[in-house]
Amino acid sequence: MEVSRLPTGARPAPVVTAGSEVARRRRRPSGEPPPLPREAPGGTRWYAAAVALTLALEIAMAIPAPRRWLTAVDDVVLRALATVRTGWLTSVLRAVGHLAYADPTRVLAWATIAVLLLTRHFRQLLSYLAMLLLVAVSAAGLALLLGRMRPTAVSMLAPWRGYAHPSVPVAVFAAVVGGAVYTAVPTGHRHRLAAGVATTAIAAVALARLYLGIDHPTDVLAALGIGGALPILGYRLLCPHEAFPVRYRRGRTAHLELSAARTAAILEALDRQLGIRATAVAACGLDASAGSTPLRIRRADGSAVFGKLYALNHLRSDRSYKFARMMLYGRLEDEKPFATVRRLVEYEDHMLRLLRDAGLPVPAPLGIVEITPEREYVVVMDFVAGAKDLGARPATVPEIDAALAIVQRLWHAGVAHRDIKPSNLLVRDDRVWLIDVAFAALRPTPWRQAVDLANMMLSLALASDAALVYQRAVRIFAPDDVGEAFAASRSVTIPTQLRARLRADGRDLLVRFRELAPARPPVPIQVWSVRRMAGSLALLVAVALAGSALYGYARVAGLL
């Protein structure tokens, strides 16, 4: 009998026993939803149906026979409303109808734009402007194309202008009010309350114009479809609350809310995809994190692992960060942003494994879990239990040596961390761990490697003394290397947290290190590249055109 043999160097597959971690891992069958499915928010189908009915109504209005039938139905409704006209009710509804006039609508629109601009909700701002322009152009264009006259079945009790179908004032008013609620009001109780007030105001304006006899019912229905349902669908596509929440409280936009659904999805994904049976997930270290949501994950056996939750809004942060670095330093920081969330988490997991293999003291990578395909992922790694941030207490000599050795190993591995600061250096029992390698770069410029050394020495000096740190550094690095590091340092090359701690410390550590190290002329950091010149030119052109474009947009959208 022929005996099968394993290829040389191959290992037999692990024996899977019931209850083992490997046994709990499984491939998600085709058709089974992910742990946190991407579901359309409640009511989306109704909004889509309203848009479809509006399209059908516009087609019917373009055909003579259906148009005559719809006009007859409109006249019946208007005559019925005319029977309840009274003096006081007419006065009230005239005042309500004024809400859809140009001036109140403009005030609300510009106030919303100002709030979104000042609070830096730029995605919501661009979506709001786009939807207002779409509604204004669509409603005005259809009115000119169809050319429907005003109602003749009843007397009109208020001034009017232009063609009747669709009702342009109602469409624009609905778009302005509904857009203000969606883009500027945080989700939750306040959002529901604001949505109720907005819906009541839009309905009151629509009813007032019917009562006053200046719009047909079909004019108002079409306006509500164009100005109400269509923008909501657009907002849910361009800036869904799940990915781009509206927030005004203090805190970083990178930190996602750990809702019950998201927490349950993370626990399920850890169990099914990595075999990690966890019982609780909680945010931790939020103050020092700007590019993800850091998580402390409690396992069933009482131990903990660490995770970083990434989502779509982190891609926006990544693009903004890298564009700003390219504009500041040109070729020294000229790198491409990640295209998807998947690529972002793959890169961090890869860098953890590369640095671990190079002998760097980093948390052991445990893998990646998918929460929602192409939208949310978690990078999982060991949790360094009992460790504190560098600077939580005075640094010892072994800790200083261990931290400086990290930079030496980074240089030998051809890697720059690019974000060395106290919160990214964990200390326990004279050992130092390097964390948060998401911005690390392979084969960086010599300038970037020198800046890593300077930031490490500044972080250590905050927890000890500059002279001691310099003395330990020249045992590992050549004095000229140290001189180059501080010749390459500027305020903009120091991470925000480290810069803030240097200001609070009071000692001018940067000047002190330059006194200790061999004198070197400042290393120029303004290195130009074709991409940087193109980006600078594009930015100048965009700023120059923004004023005129905004003015033209405001006129088309009826905001001026």
Image (tube, grey):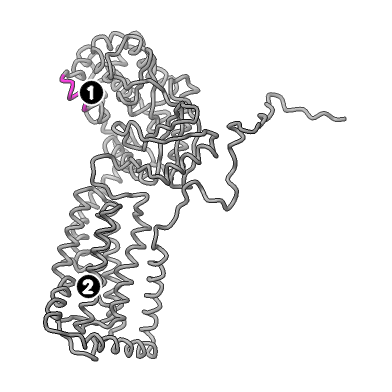
Find residue 300 and report its horizontal and vertical position in percent: 49, 30
Magenta segment boundaries in residue numbering: 500-506
Find residue 81 and report its horizontal and vertical position in percent: 24, 85
Query: What residue is drawn where x is 20% and y is 77%?
Result: 208
Query: What residue is drawn where x is 34% and y is 26%?
Result: 424
Q: Is residue 526 above or below residue 37?
A: above
Find out whether residue 225 is within the magenta segment.
no
Please state which amino acid type lies under the numbered disc 2: Ala
Location of mark 2 (residue): 204
Query: SS of the residue at dot 2?
Result: helix
Dot placed on the residue nearer the N-terminal end, 1 or 2: 2
**Nearest to viewer (mark 1 / mark 2):** 2
Please state which amino acid type lies under the numbered disc 1: Pro
Q: Is residue 390 above or below residue 98?
A: above
> In the rendered view, does 339 fall on the left or right side of 494?
right
Find residue 558 and report its horizontal and vertical position in percent: 20, 69
Between 239 and 155, the one nearer to me in the picture: 155
Query: SS of the residue at dot 1?
Result: loop
Q: Residues within 10 Å of mark 2 (few under 14, many from 20)?
A: some
> In the rendered view, does 304 fall on the left or right side of 82?
right
Report if the CB atoms under discs 1 and 2 are less than 8 Å apart.
Answer: no
Between 101 and 301, the one nearer to me in the picture: 301
> In the rendered view, does 482 fall on the left or right side of 111?
right
Location of mark 1 (residue): 522
Of the 4 image quadrants, the one containing the C terminus is bottom left
Q: Is residue 224 above or below residue 350?
A: below
Of the 4 image quadrants, the one containing the N terminus is top right
Q: Is residue 144 above or below residue 466?
A: below
Residue 435 visible (yes or no): yes
Query: What residue is drawn where x is 33% and y is 13%?
Result: 400
* Magenta residues, dominant SS class: helix
Between 268 and 44, the one nearer to me in the picture: 268
